[in-house]
Each structure stands twice: as C-alpha cells, then as structure tokens.
Image (cartoon, rainbow, N blue to C red):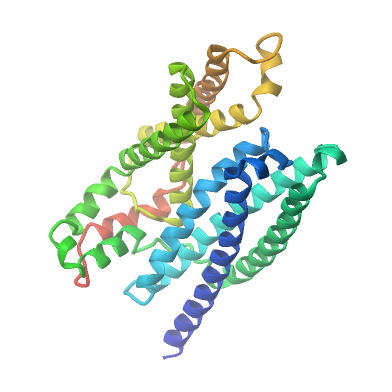
Amino acid sequence: MAAMEHLMANGRASSAMVWASLGAAGVFEALTVLETQDKTVRAASPWQDDPYDVVVSLAQFAVPMLALVIALRLLVWRAPGGADRARQTVRAAGAMVTLVGLTVVSEWAAVVSRTPASSSGTWASVLIGGLVVNSVLTVAVAVLLVRGRRGHGSADPWRHDWLGDVVFLCRRIPVLRRWVGPDAAVWVRRRAMTVFVALSTLAGAAVTSAQAIGERWTDPLLIAWFLVVAATSNLAFCAISNAVAGFIARPARTRLRRVAEVSVVTGCVAISVATAFRDALWPMFGTGSLTSVPALVALTLGVGLATSLVTAAVLLACSPDDSFGLRRRFGAAATHLRRPDKHR
C-alpha cells in the first residue's frame, strides 16, 4: 500500500513538472514564432543572423514537436506502465527545456555581441524583454525538473515505451483498431532508424519547400543543400531525443550497426554546427568570403562526412562496448515489448 501511494505521489509530481515544462515551452514558442515569421520583428531581432539563427530555427520546430508528443502522452497518463511513463515523460520534458535553455543562451550571446545601437528600437526592446521572461521561466522549470529527478533516477530497463502508448490509444479507436496493433509496433521498433530517416526527410522537405518559396530560390544545388541540412538536423534530433526519452524501445543491434548509427548522427550534428559557423570555418579551407553555393556545400557536408568517418574509426578502434549506451536501457525493454500485453 505504501509503495502504491509512493508511486501515485511520484505520478502527481511528475505531472506537475510536465505541465510546468509545457507552459514554459508555450511561451517560448509564441515569442519565437513572432520573431521569426514577422518580417518587421525579424529585422529588429538581435539574433537574426547565424550562428544564432541556426539554434533558433532548430528550436522553433523541435520544441513544439516535443511538446505535442508530451501533451498527447498525458492522455494515457493512468494507463499501465505508469512508472516508466513518468520517468520517460519527465526526461522528454527535460530535453525540451534543455533545448529552450540552449536557445536562450544563444540569444543572450547575440545580444551581448551586438552593438548597443543594433539592439535598440521598440521591437528589439520587446524581444529582449521576452528573452528575460523566457530566461526566468526556463531556469525555474529547470530547477523544478532537477529536484524532481530524485524520484526518477532508477537505471532499471524500461518495460514500456511511447510507441506502446500509441498502440494502447489506437486499440480503443474503432477506425484505427484494425490497422494499428502490437505487430505494427514490433515492425517500427525493428526499423526505428529507417522510420527516423523517413520522417526527418519528409519534415525537411516541407521546411525546404517553404523556405525556397518564401525566399524565391531558383538554384537547384542550394535547394538540395538546404534539404540535406534540414533532414540531417531532424535526424540528429530524432536519434538523440529517442536515446534520452525512449520514444521507441529498440532491440539489441550488432556492434557494427551501433557504430554506424552513432557515426551518422555525429556527422549530422557536425553539418548543423558547420552551417552555423560556416563563415568562421571558411578561412581554414579557402580565401575570401563564402559566397559560392558549391563552396558552401563542400564545406558543410565535407565537415559532416569527415566527422562521421573519424567517429566511426575511433569507436571501432577504442570502444568494444555499446557505443550509444542503449543496450542496457532498451535491450531488455524491447524483448519484453515484442510480447503483446493483455491491455494492448
């Protein structure tokens, strides 16, 4: 009885932390959409240029995606697997708040690095005021999450994942019941990386289309490069957030496959970093200003490829263990999840 009361108390505390995180994320997203989508406001933004804009652009899409899946999971908060659900959802909220925090730090860096004149004006003052609000909310929620981690620090393998909750919900909707079941979940778990690549490419294509139309791009190479950058940043986000929050519990993989996945994800991160700091990196490889699209493609994708190859070589040479740290966390969970439970 005492254990049950403890679990219920942890569940209520986790729910409160999650709601606080969603509130802070909502304020952040509202201000971010204003500063990026309104041309007048964007022109006055202290962080409209790279490398700051790369961070803001990533957060603009990643934060609402995390907030959406977290909010949807609250619909099954009291379903079987509550302990795992609380731990995973709090971790996802922590990842979301961390992303917001990194963006806030990037925006403050932009404010500090710009001249006072470039950060003046009505809209610049409004944006900096909003940044102050975001900073206070982010710190407050981060402190709440750190304190709450004491009740969710277990290293035991998870026996439930977010995908299982999707099946649980769909099995209760007549239209979806015949299409979504345990077998579909098993298929997704076995092909998680393929699913991540497909979703990342689709999302990247949507963003690229909007950007190309909005900016009236006509250069096929520029459009293709932007698609690769968007898709790779999305893939890195999917893989890393899945490792943190356990959206899809993956079966054990061979060491070579794990090394390949880690190398690909590392290369994806390197492409985003190279894109953000391209002007600073270019003097190491070329002369003059970076104005040529082929040079931009060669620099950013070349850095990503080189980073991926170096990562693979290092892991193959030095790390005989699980490179991504997922076997301990997800191996047993995936074995359990392949056996449909009664409530599913």
**Residue 62, placed above or below residue 6:** above
**Residue 124, placed above or below residue 298:** below
Examine the rendering and report whether any part of residue 263 can be seen.
Answer: no
Residue situated furthest top in the rendering: 287
Residue 201 x %, y %: 37, 35
Which picture quadrant has residue 52?
top right
Residue 220 x %, y %: 43, 17
Which picture quadrant has residue 22?
bottom right
Front in this rendered view, residue 126 or 11:
126
> Residue visible at 20% across and 53% down?
184
> Residue visible at 20% across and 61% down?
339
> Residue visible at 63% across and 31% down?
276
Residue 230 x %, y %: 47, 34
Say left or right for 188 vs 228. left
**Residue 69, placed above or below residue 241:** below
Residue situated furthest left in the rendering: 178
Front in this rendered view, residue 217 or 328:
217
Residue situated furthest right in the rendering: 116
Residue 104 x %, y %: 68, 50
The tally of labels here is: 0
Say left or right for 144 vs 60. right
Give the position of the C terminus as an image quadrant.
bottom left
Say left or right for 311 vs 39. left
Examine the rendering and report whether any part of residue 115 can be seen.
Answer: yes
